[in-house]
Image: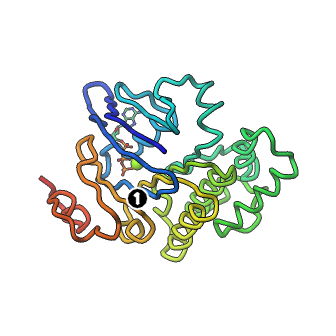
């Protein structure tokens, strides 16, 4: 279980997360929606230890990891938690295979042969041909996105954080990635936290959906009841109304 308790983060005078609280239970798929620039990526980066929160707690499987050092994150968190970065965040100087292998090397028990099998398998799972030997600059935006997903799932982590996994993908690929997220939850018991702007996609695959607004999760509901909510800002957002406030 992942518990975010009153997490706060400011950049200078700009408060981004303001006592954000959110719980993701084991095997759950929870999506967070919200306007551009509200801090959704900041939230995920804080959970995986790339940004240090100013206040609040992050509890993972009952352990308070908020103040973990980089070394503790590498030892205890990153082996069981992967993140799909919004912009892919692949290393340009490395091939696709080397990028994925870098993540796999965290799992010390895997042999070179097993790692190479995992690379091939994860590329296949995101619908890519064996492009291990290509460099990111040779790929399209949608391919980079899928390599980033392949890298995150290759380690078969217990927790997956997806930052806009389907943005920039065509509808067929978006469906395929959404199905993959559900499949990983069903088959491997993954617990997923997703950031997405694709409302119909999150409705289809999530258990719960929460909205981040002005630093807080102002409302959350089960995906089944998405369209029956009695919350003005939430409703305006999911209906794509321009003016909130
Ligand atoms: N490292 C940083 N230093 C300073 N400001 C930052 C940093 N990272 C994010 N911010 C600021 O925090 C705010 C939230 O950014 P974030 O990337 O989390 O938004 P978002 O909700 O993910 O938006 P989008 O939907 O466009 O991806 C923005 O105003 C951004 O400029
Ligand atoms: Mg973002």
Which of 180 and 23 lies nearest the eye of the viewer? 23
Q: In this view, does 45 lie above or below 53?
A: below
| Residue under the point 46% across and 52% down | 193
Whole-percent x, y for residue 36 in the image: 32, 51
| Residue under the point 46% across and 31% down | 51
Whether residue 42 is visible here, answered yes or no, is no
Count residues near mark 1 (Cα–Cα under 10 Å), then give few for <14, some for 14-19, many for 20+. Answer: many
Q: Callout 1: helix, strand or loop?
A: loop
Whether residue 225 is visible here, answered yes or no, is yes
> Left or right: 127 with respect to 44?
right
Which residue is denoted by mark 1 in the rendering? 196
| Residue under the point 29% across and 60% down | 221
Which of 198 and 57 lies nearest the eye of the viewer? 57
Q: Is residue 53 above or below residue 172?
A: above
**Residue farthest left in this picture:** 245
Q: Is residue 27 above or below residue 227?
A: above
Mark 1 Cβ and ligand 1 under 8 Å apart? no
Whole-percent x, y for residue 84 in the image: 55, 50
Q: In this figure, what is the number of numbered marks?
A: 1
| Residue under the point 73% across and 68% down | 129
Whole-percent x, y for residue 181 in the image: 55, 63
> Left or right: 25 with respect to 88?
left
Whole-percent x, y for residue 197 in the image: 37, 61
Which of 94 and 43 lies nearest the eye of the viewer? 43
- The colour mode here is rainbow
In which quadrant of the rendered view does residue 43 lie?
A: top left
> Left or right: 74 with respect to 40?
right
> Left or right: 192 with respect to 212?
right
């Amino acid at each position: 279980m992942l518990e975010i308790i009153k997490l706060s983060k400011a950049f200078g005078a700009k408060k981004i997360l303001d006592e954000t609280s959110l719980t993701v239970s084991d095997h759950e798929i929870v999506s967070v929606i919200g306007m551009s620039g509200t801090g959704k990526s900041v939230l995920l980066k804080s959970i995986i230890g790339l940004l240090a929160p100013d206040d609040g707690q992050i509890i993972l499987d009952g352990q308070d990891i908020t103040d973990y050092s980089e070394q503790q994150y590498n030892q205890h968190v990153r082996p069981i938690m992967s993140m799909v970065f919004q912009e892919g965040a692949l290393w340009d100087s490395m091939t696709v295979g080397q990028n994925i292998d870098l993540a796999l090397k965290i799992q010390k028990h895997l042999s070179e042969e097993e790692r190479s099998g995992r690379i091939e398998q994860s590329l296949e799972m995101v619908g890519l041909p064996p492009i291990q030997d290509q460099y990111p600059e040779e790929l399209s935006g949608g391919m980079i996105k899928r390599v980033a997903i392949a890298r995150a799932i290759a380690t078969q982590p217990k927790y997956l954080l997806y930052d806009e996994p389907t943005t920039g993908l065509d509808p067929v690929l978006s469906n395929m990635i959404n199905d993959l997220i559900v499949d990983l939850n069903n088959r491997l018991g993954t617990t997923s936290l997703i950031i997405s702007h694709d409302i119909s996609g999150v409705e289809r695959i999530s258990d719960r959906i929460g909205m981040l607004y002005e630093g807080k999760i102002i409302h959350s509901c089960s995906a089944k009841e998405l369209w029956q909510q009695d919350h003005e800002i939430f409703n305006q957002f999911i209906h794509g109304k321009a003016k909130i406030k």
